[in-house]
Amino acid sequence: MSATRRLFRFKAPTRAGMLISALFGFVIFAYLYGIEILHPHYFSWLLSGDSSIYFFGFNFFNQEPWHLPLGQINSYSFPEGASVVYTDSSPLVSIGLKALNFLPGMQSIYQFHGIWILTCFALQGALGFFLFYRYTRNWWNSLIGSVFLVTLPSFLNRGYEGTRHYSLLPHFILLLALALAFHPKKKRSVFTWAALTIIALGLHFYLAFVVGFFAFASLYDRLKEKRFQVFICTVAVVIASYFYGYFTIPLGNSSAGGFGLYSMNLNALFNPNPYPAWLPIWPTANPLQSEGFQYMGLGFLILSLMYLRPETFRKLTLPNQCAIIFLILLSLSFRLSFGPWVIGEWFTVPAYFVFVFYYIKDFEPSKAKRAAYAVATLLLLFAFGKIARATGRFFWPIEYLALFLILMRKPHPSILAMLLLVQLGDLSGIMKAIHTQNIRLNTLSNPARPIPEAWNEKDFDHISFVRPGSVHVTPLVFFALEKHKTIGPLILARASSRFRKFEQDSLSMELAAHQFRPHTLYVIEDQNLWDNLKAFCAAPTGPCQSVQLAQTDLYRLLLSR
């Protein structure tokens, strides 16, 4: 009986703290986004920036029959197709919702993103409290720490500006990975790490990368001992990746340009750019470094200076130390920058080599092996940077780990509370900026009909963009979704560039030769091609008898019946 009482004494404060933290997450969410976005049939706020790709990707996927792999989409970005992975539509959530299509109303056009954003805020707080309390047994510190998590600028930043990367909000998966990797006593099983990696793959590739990396670091000392389990779990991860739709494009297209441009600036931790804050705004090397936004907030910065020590880092296992160092170097990239000044690869590559070579000298006396490890590190940095591109994001887990390590040192709750007030005051400008943006977004309406009223949508099955350039595609994509048309090509996180080039070249040559695909609505950006088609179709006879042309405020349209 006494053991039962102890169990419930432990559980009750944990449940209370998790509930309070989740409620705080809800309050922050409601202020930043407004509760109206929770309505599944209110989606006009999503129809701009990258968030439109998430919305359209999910709804085209949801209206199609099932394919293999499960996450494949044929009608979106036709004819190359796509997958929910490459529309950043949270594959695990999208596939789960599509499985409920037998329920009334689940095949209609709707959005889950509002509820998903709220879920991420609530779990950020609740799981943060749970993990902090589990490791520190300090209720007040855990509660204050969870508030730091919910208001961390790099977390809030995912919902700001034109891109609005809502699919990157489930940072709670990073908290779970850190809790597993840095537990002071317990070593988690291979199967636990595999399950977490598969879940992360179903949320977003960047999150899965971090989870997989810490999984490897945590299991490094047991890889030979558990090699059969590692093999089984690796196969399970690959199979899950296939079903999600990661292999719907050729492996050669898995790499992307931009490594070094989407990096983290060395001033990122104390640079609130572009937000108003108590600290001054510093310049960055280029606008793309917004993906490396890692401002900690003034309260968190002071807390880190007070409680983080090099010896704390050195107490971690060597594989975990190496994982952290690797993620930091990857986030900085080979194109190191401080403010507007850039130091090129001619310096950083040898500097990184020397750093790794001397860092591991206490663990590896052989100079030859240390040199080999340093070379391998450089090659891996290059390979992962080419695949991931926006490497500035990989500093996220470092900030979360810093907060973990601070709370493990058990600072006095009054100090934490005081610095939390400083943090919230400093971040008030950031939260106001996001709040103001979402007020504006919540006043938007669905796009109007993009084709002439006299045209019958039954005359075509496909909408084809011919070298779209700067064409505003959203009204046409929404129209295609409503009328169950195929449409393409469209922006994706990754696309089959070779196939897309071949398709676009074919379309251009066909139109230049006045050959028209039946039941197709062409959207033509090129003025010379448009003038050529107008002149050709001005003749009273010929192929243009089955063709109509129209120019609207947004588009040059050719309808081939």
Image: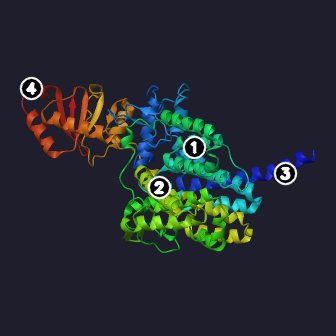
Q: Quadrant of residue 479?
A: top left
Give the distance between the C-alpha atoms of the residues marked 3 and 4, in whole angstroms.
85 Å
Residue under label 2, please give it.
376
Give the distance between the C-alpha atoms of the residues marked 1 and 3, in whole angstroms.
33 Å
Q: Percent position (x, y) of residue 364?
A: 58, 61
Residue under label 1, please give it.
197
Instruction: In this rendered view, identify the residue nearer to me: 416 or 162.
Output: 416
View extreme (right): residue: 1
Q: Percent position (x, y) of residue 511?
A: 16, 35
Image check: 52 left or right of 79?
A: right
Image check: 497 left or right of 137?
A: left
Instruction: In this rendered view, identify the residue nearer to me: 245 or 219.
Output: 219
Give the distance between the C-alpha atoms of the residues marked 3 and 2, in whole angstroms.
50 Å
Q: In the image, what residue type sits under mark 3? A: Arg
Q: Quadrant of residue 463?
A: top left
Residue visible at 54% across and 56% down in the picture:
32
Q: Quadrant of residue 457?
A: top left
Mark 2 in CB contact with mark 1 (< 8 angstroms): no
Color theme of the render: rainbow
Quarter the N terminus occupies: top right
Residue under label 3, please give it.
9
First in residue order: circle 3 vs circle 4: 3
Q: Secondary structure at mark 2?
A: helix
Q: In the image, what residue type sits under mark 1? A: Thr
Q: Secondary structure at mark 4?
A: loop
Residue under label 4, please give it.
542
Please, is residue 102 above or below residue 389 in the view? above
